[in-house]
Amino acid sequence: MKLNWFTRKGIIYWPASVIGWVILVIAAAFAIYTFIDIDSRSHSVSDTLTNFVFNLLLIGLVYTIIAYFTEAGKKVD
């Protein structure tokens, strides 16, 4: 069974269904929440960005793994 939640356009995975959009919104909301949380505990801009970039890479990695395994497959005729 192939799940068709995402489609790949170049190196970006775009949502192709409602579930894909929900996953994208959850990932973006979690990234914003993480940024606000890190910013509230940081003492400088560089401290905030250094800690946020690592978390953003992890969020992007999880999103990409989910999208990779649920992308719409190409038909082989």
Image: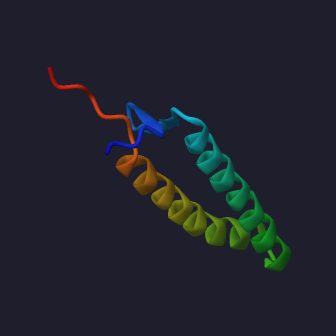
Q: Which residue is drawn at 36% across and 51% down?
A: 69
Q: Residue at x 61, y 38 (%)?
A: 18
Q: Which residue is most to the front?
A: 1
Q: Nearer the viewer, residue 61 or 46?
A: 61
Q: Which residue is most to the top?
A: 77
User: Where 57 sits versus 19, above or below?
Assistant: below
Q: Which of 43 and 13 is in front in this view?
A: 13
Quadrant containing the C terminus in the rendered view: top left
The way the protein has been coloured in the rendering is rainbow
Quadrant containing the N terminus in the rendered view: top left
Q: Which residue is drawn at 40% across and 43% down?
A: 3
Residue 28 in the image: x percent, y percent?
68, 51
Horizontal side of residue 37 vs 30, given as left or right: right
Horizontal side of residue 62 vs 32, given as left or right: left
Q: Residue at x 40, y 46 (%)?
A: 70
Please identify the quarter of the rendering in which residue 51 is found: bottom right
Q: Which residue is most to the right?
A: 40
Total labels: the figure holds 0
Residue 64 in the image: x percent, y percent?
44, 52
